[in-house]
Image (cartoon, rainbow, N blue to C red):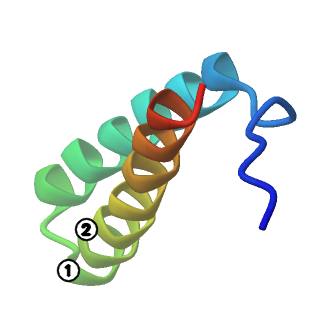
Amino acid sequence: MNKSVKDISLSMYTVLLMGLLLWIVYGFYINSLPIIAANIITATLSVLIVITKIEYK
């Protein structure tokens, strides 16, 4: 199994996470559970990708 993460952009995932956090804040602002839930799930998966990127760097 090849554990290469060279093709994953850390800066792209950082920007994505910032955008997702803003969407979560917006979801709380308008009190919308679907927006909050969807973005928390996506942010969690993105954090896992970032952790994997850092671990196998």
Residue to which mark 2 is pinned: 36
Nearer the observer, 4 or 42: 4
Question: What residue lies at 27% left-to-right and 77% top-to-bottom?
Answer: 37
Q: At 47% across and 28% down in the image, what residue appears?
A: 54
- The quadrant of the picture occupied by the N terminus is bottom right
Residue occupied by mark 1: 33
Looking at the image, the residue that sits furthest to the bottom is 34
3D distance between C-alphas at marks 2 and 1? 5 Å
Asked if disc 2 and disc 1 are in contact, CB closer than 8 Å, the reply is: yes
Most distant residue in the front direction: 1
Pick the residue in front: 3 or 44: 3
Q: Is residue 48 above or below residue 19?
A: below
Q: Amino acid at mark 2?
A: Ile
Kind of residue at disc 1: Leu
Apparent side of residue 54 relative to residue 44 in the rendered image (left or right): right
Q: Is residue 33 above or below residue 31?
A: below
**Among the 4 quarters of the image, the one containing residue 11:** top right
In this rendering, the answer to whether 54 lies above or below 51 is above
